[in-house]
Image (cartoon, helix red, strand yellow):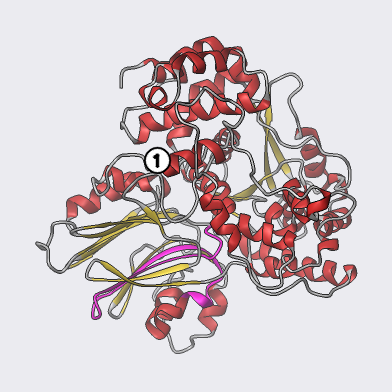
Amino acid sequence: MCGIAGVAERADTVPGHLANPETLSRLAAALAHRGPDGQGHVQFGRVGLVHTRLAFIDLAGGQQPIFAGPAAIVANGEIYNDLALRAAMPEVRFATGSDCEPPLHLWLREGAAYARALRGMYAIAIHERGADTLVLSRDPFGIKPLYFVERPDGLAFASEPQALLAAGLAGRGVRPERLRELLQLQFTTGADTIFPDIRRVLPGETLRIAGGRVLSRERLPALPEGPPEVIDEPAALARLDRALDESVDLHCRSEVPYGMFLSGGIDSAAVLAAMARRGGAPVRAFTAAFDVPGAADESETARAMAHSVGADHEVLRIGASEVWRHLPRIVAAMDDPVADYAIIPSWLLARQARRSVKAVLCGEGGDELFAGYGRYRHAMRPWWRGRRAMRRHGTFDGLGGLLREVPSGWRAGFEAAALVAAPGRSRLAAAQAADVADWLPHDLLIKLDRCLMAHGVEGRTPLIDPQVAAAAFRLPDVLKVRDGRGKYLLRRWVEQHAPAARPFAPKQGFTVPIGNWIAAEGARLGTLVASDEAIAAIAHPDRVRALFVDAASSRARHAAWTLLFYALWHRAHVRAVPVDGDVFEVLGSAG
């Protein structure tokens, strides 16, 4: 929805060192793409708040910061139970129609516990002048991002790390342990980002800050606790139907045009069906396809699904020339790096969608909540039937001699998340919970946020919702996985409400043909990547050139992509080199 940022000075520093108009202006400029509809800021002594607005609700009166008595709020996101919260506070005279105003009054009434009442996706900053308290909060699933840096002279926060870097509030560098994770996992785990000074507010966290120091932390869980429940299939289907209907309806609240991203998969089929049965104007659906012979193509399935509900459907065909032309900017959007090649269609599809909508509903979270990944089925097996730990192998395993050092300790962050298990959960539920804790917020949701917000488009995720989680996560294993397939209950729901999706038919899967594109330009790309200083520091240049020329296996192609991504990312965010031009021009330039 927006971008937020701010600073809080330490009480023992010179006033105005951090909290000054120049710093706030630099933060706002760096977040302008997140909020092209307006900017606002406020400064109270040693605290300054910044907001860049992408407007959806109360277009005329919802500017931020919003004030109430001694407090002010800036927020990025949507509070979906806004109307219920207002009804529960009849004594309050609300100044705006913004869904971000009720959290401010909840804070004044309940303090740090205010976030327990919120349903939505959000990153929030509240400043209360009398207590000189700054509060930072993030939704339990981590749908909306929030980062901060603690400095000797105070604390600064922002929706994106690049804003803290651009404002000179954090140093440009690389944390070695996070680089190892990025190379092997394609994302980084936990609170520490790849930048040495910058940390994430974790999903569900509320930080209370005073005098420029973090004084306390509270954290809300994303998932319901407890063992698998006892429920039969008809009752589970009826409950899921109610949860999907309510969640999609809430996620469609908007005073501006919105649509959805439609693949040929189960998750987006469920979102499409639930959107279509709301009635009204036809759903606007956008699908990506690839101009590569033999590449997996779900566009015809998506077209059939869209036709079955009368949706307006656009297919964007992506070819190699477009990828190479835009890849430097696509990678630069991923300031918190995610080397997932799905960033390519996500960024390009958002660019296409922005011509007609400002928000899109997406199917993220379906695999995690309904148990869709094959790795979950392996985790369910007893040891004597070949149970395998998730993410046993990294991208560069088996490619000995390529990297200067064999990456070590790269599974530590993921294993730490996997150890946080509630009592009574099955092995399947524990594996899902580990992904919800790290993979979902630090890979999939970062990708969605940056690729869409680069074009001023908001991504909404109705499957990542507390009520949907309540209907799905504690299902018995047999309603999640059956006959070697995951997402059993969701498939059954789609079978009833969107049969054109053919939910039990074999699927090709959505695979970006990055290997084909790299192979066609292997010699040229290999030379450029191998000569990049960031790559030369971690890999042997001759081996890099050979990898790009003859990337025979899928692991080798993935490794080549990861090195290409890192070379472009390092230029943009560590060396701060402009990424104007296509991939060959950028990699061939000095810097």
129 in magenta: yes
Residue 483 placement, left or right of 102 = right
Quadrant where the image shows the C terminus:
top left
Image quarter of residue 496: bottom right
Residue under the point 39% across and 15% down = 588
Q: From this viewpoint, which residue is outermost toward the left?
A: 14
Q: Is residue 252 visible?
A: no
Residue under the point 72% across and 65% down = 473
Q: Which residue is mark 1?
A: 176
**Secondary structure category for the residue under label 1:** helix
Above or below, 220 against 252 in this view is below
Disc 1: CA contacts within 10 A as few (<14), some (14-19) or many (>=20):
few
Above or below, 92 against 490 in this view is below
User: Magenta region: which residues?
Assistant: 115-142
Location of residue 392 in the rendering, given as x and y in whole percent from the top left corner:
64, 43
Front residue (pair 126, 556): 556
Location of residue 374 in the rendering, given as x and y in whole percent from the top left corner:
76, 46
Above or below, 418 against 570 in this view is below
Q: From this viewpoint, which residue is outermost toward the front?
A: 384
Front residue (pair 443, 419): 419
486 in magenta: no
Image quarter of residue 242: bottom right
Q: From this viewpoint, which residue is outermost toward the bottom?
A: 91
Location of residue 308 in the rendering, given as x and y in whole percent from the top left corner:
84, 46
Kind of residue at disc 1: Pro
Front residue (pair 479, 459): 479
Location of residue 450 in the rendering, given as x and y in whole percent from the top left corner:
48, 44
